[in-house]
Image: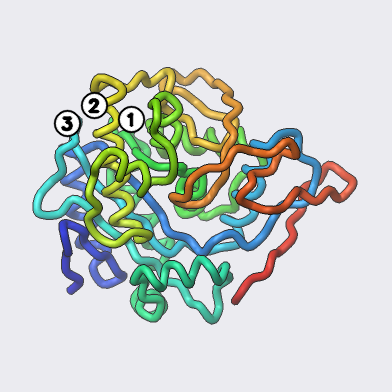
Amino acid sequence: MPTADNGIQEVWHSNLEDEFRKIRTIVQKYPYVAMDTEFPGVVARPIGDFKTNSDYQYQLLRCNVDLLRIIQVGMTFFDDTGSTPSPLCTWQFNFKFNLTEDMYAKDSIDLLTSCGILFKKHEEEGIEMNDFAELLMTSGVVLSDTVKWISFHSNYDFGYMIKLLTNLPLPAEEQEFFELIRIYFPNIYDVKYLMKSCKNLKGGLQEVAEQLEIARIGQQHQAGSDSLMTGLVFFKMREMFFEDHIDDVKYCGHLYGLGTSYVTNGNSSTSSVAGGIGGNSSANISTASGVADNHSATPTLNGDDTPGTTLMTTSS
């Protein structure tokens, strides 16, 4: 049976149902869920005409999430004061992933391997995505107005979660994507978006944690540890910069880097947010061409209004 380390419970196929039984109880008293994912990088870029940088970023997200398989999901549970349950507060779900059969970006897999992700074990003992989705749907964690999700620059995190829960490709339009998010995840706080109102806070998750003097528990670039760090950063920021109160109308429902968002009263709003993509890396402001600097590429136009996809150098 997988064991817990530093309050982080490893979850594989063998203990998936047992751990969800615990989570169904935990979430009732600890309804703040910090979430992070690990995924196999970016392997494709959209081709077409893009009205805005946000439109390009969503189509980039869409084509990659549709092509790739998730590797890990981490969830850490907190109460309204920022306290965590004991002895377990974090669950790290490890999905089936086969380096021989599944598509990935080599640099991303190299990084994850160096951070201790055991791809042979993922191949042999990993969780089937449909099994996870079925248990998550009935866990009380999603589809709940009382649960508040905490994330960091989480376009891809929620992209993969929507793919898991619907078992469908992502919607063609960004607005439809946010409509699904509003259904499954009614309350989201993206720490990277909150940082826009925090003087002097900058960078990726690790850099922000160091500025706030928060020590890491577990291994960086693993979803469990990163989700725990995300939650700790959120509550420290809430205390230091927001007087322990987040204005939901202003901050809830925004994902940093995408231009469409929602707020908790159900009114749609838009926000032109410049940003890059990709896990917990620091964001880059978009260039005049509408493409984030960290992509080192511009959209390829195919002469019509229909976006397509071009594959980058990949391994499979």
Q: Which of marks 3 and 2 is nearer the N terminus?
A: 3
Q: In this view, does 152 lie above or below 123?
A: above
- Residues 267 and 143: in front is 267
Residue at 56% over, 69% down:
104
Side (left or right) of 225 relative to 131: left
Residue at 48% over, 30% down:
254
Does residue 228 appear in the picture of this structure?
yes
Q: Mark 3 belongs to which amino acid?
A: Thr
Label 3 – label 2 distance at C-alpha = 10 Å
**Which quarter of the rendering shows the N terminus?**
bottom left
Residue 291 locus on image (x, y percent): 69, 43
Q: Nearer the viewer, mark 3 or mark 2?
A: 2
**Which quarter of the rendering shows the C terminus?**
bottom right
Residue 310 locus on image (x, y percent): 74, 60
Residue 261 locus on image (x, y percent): 53, 28
Q: Mark 1 belongs to which amino acid?
A: Asp
Q: Mark 2 belongs to which amino acid?
A: Glu
State the SS at label 1: loop
Q: Earlier in the sequence, mark 3 or mark 1?
A: 3
- Residues 256 and 206: in front is 206
Residue at 59% over, 59% down:
42
Q: Earlier in the sequence, mark 2 or mark 1?
A: 1
Characterize the local packing of mark 1: few (<14), some (14-19) or many (20 or more) Cα atoms within 10 angstroms. some
Characterize the local packing of mark 3: few (<14), some (14-19) or many (20 or more) Cα atoms within 10 angstroms. few
Where does label 3 land, which residue? 81
Characterize the local packing of mark 2: few (<14), some (14-19) or many (20 or more) Cα atoms within 10 angstroms. some
Where does label 2 land, which residue? 239
Where does label 1 land, which residue? 145
